[in-house]
């Protein structure tokens, strides 16, 4: 009899715990809104990023990132826009992610420009989410973007021995964004769809690679490569204000549609 009482009590507590957990999740889901977005203009200050024949990545990314924020402020006034930088300053890689985490952001969007001097004919957009690099090309992109830490003093201690040139270092943290991968892929797919169908860009698709800044964020996060500065034609386009506006508009529309879908699930 005593054993049955203990067993029944255990079952009751288990059912109660499941009920409370379910109720809590339902309540949180019903209240969830996409209220804050961090827009990260890649590189800046002493870190120029990649470059073409006449332009630097840091300048183009700042113009596009600023424009994305302007669109969000105008058309989604309920969303707070947070820039990791709004001028030509150097922001450490760790600080970019930390800023998003401290602000309790709902989405993190990092904007970059690509380069591949050995293949000047290559062009197009790519949007990355955190994960294992599927090809040598993906690893090279991640390696270049992660190498920003080399501009920082004391990076060996700060980044706990992480080596941006080592595939092994990337593999060690490649799965830690798994909790957000579905939503990150959702947003990334929307960005590339907008680029290919609405913004007049050639989409190279959604890819995965090990980016430090994506790993350290605690929300759905994507890194966008808006084109290749080593392609002569695309470099000219990326410096054109109308092209920058089209790219920014595509990113905004993808974010807007993502926000609407997520909030419709409440």
Image (cartoon, rainbow, N blue to C red):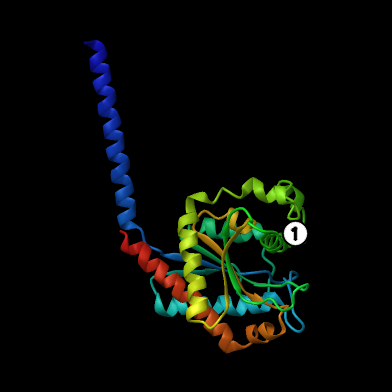
In the rendered structure, the answer to whether residue 264 lies left or right of residue 218 reads left
In the rendered view, tell whether residue 16 sits above or below residue 23. above
Q: Is residue 242 above or below residue 26?
A: below
Which residue is found at the position 26% from the left and 13% from the top?
A: 3
Residue 108 in view here: yes
Residue at the spot x=71%, y=47% of the render? 168
Residue 166 picture location, percent across and down:
75, 51
Callout 1 secondary element: loop
Using the image, determine if residue 24 lies above or below residue 186.
above
- Residue 165, located in which quarter of the rendered image? bottom right
Q: Which residue is mark 1?
A: 152
Q: Position of residue 240 (x, y in %)?
A: 62, 88
In which image quadrant can residue 57 be found?
bottom right
Looking at the image, which is closer to me, 227 or 56? 227
- Residue drawn at 58 percent across, 58 percent down: 214
Q: Quadrant of residue 85?
A: bottom right
């Amino acid at each position: 009899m005593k054993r049955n009482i203990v067993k029944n009590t255990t079952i009751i507590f288990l059912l109660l715990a499941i009920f409370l957990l379910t109720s809590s999740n339902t309540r949180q889901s019903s209240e969830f809104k996409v209220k804050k977005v961090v827009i990260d203009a890649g590189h800046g200050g002493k870190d120029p990023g990649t470059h073409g024949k006449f332009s630097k990545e840091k300048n183009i990314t700042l113009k596009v990132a600023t424009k994305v924020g302007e669109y969000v402020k105008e058309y989604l006034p309920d969303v707070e826009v947070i820039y990791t930088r709004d001028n030509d300053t150097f922001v450490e890689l760790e600080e970019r992610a930390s800023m998003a985490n401290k602000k309790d952001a709902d989405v993190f969007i990092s904007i970059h420009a690509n380069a591949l001097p050995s293949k000047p004919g290559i062009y197009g957009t790519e949007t990355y989410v955190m994960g294992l690099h599927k090809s040598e090309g993906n690893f090279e992109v991640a390696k270049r973007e992660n190498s920003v830490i080399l501009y920082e003093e004391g990076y060996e201690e700060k980044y706990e021995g992480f080596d941006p040139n080592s595939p092994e270092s990337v593999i060690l943290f490649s799965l830690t964004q798994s909790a957000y991968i579905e939503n990150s892929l959702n947003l990334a797919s929307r960005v590339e769809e907008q680029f290919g169908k609405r913004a007049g860009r050639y989409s190279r698709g959604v890819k995965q690679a090990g980016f430090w800044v994506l790993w350290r964020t605690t929300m759905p996060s994507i890194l966008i490569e808006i084109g290749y500065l080593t392609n002569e034609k695309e470099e000219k386009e990326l410096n054109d204000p109308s092209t920058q506006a089209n790219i920014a508009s595509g990113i905004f529309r993808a974010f807007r549609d993502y926000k609407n879908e997520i909030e419709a699930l409440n």
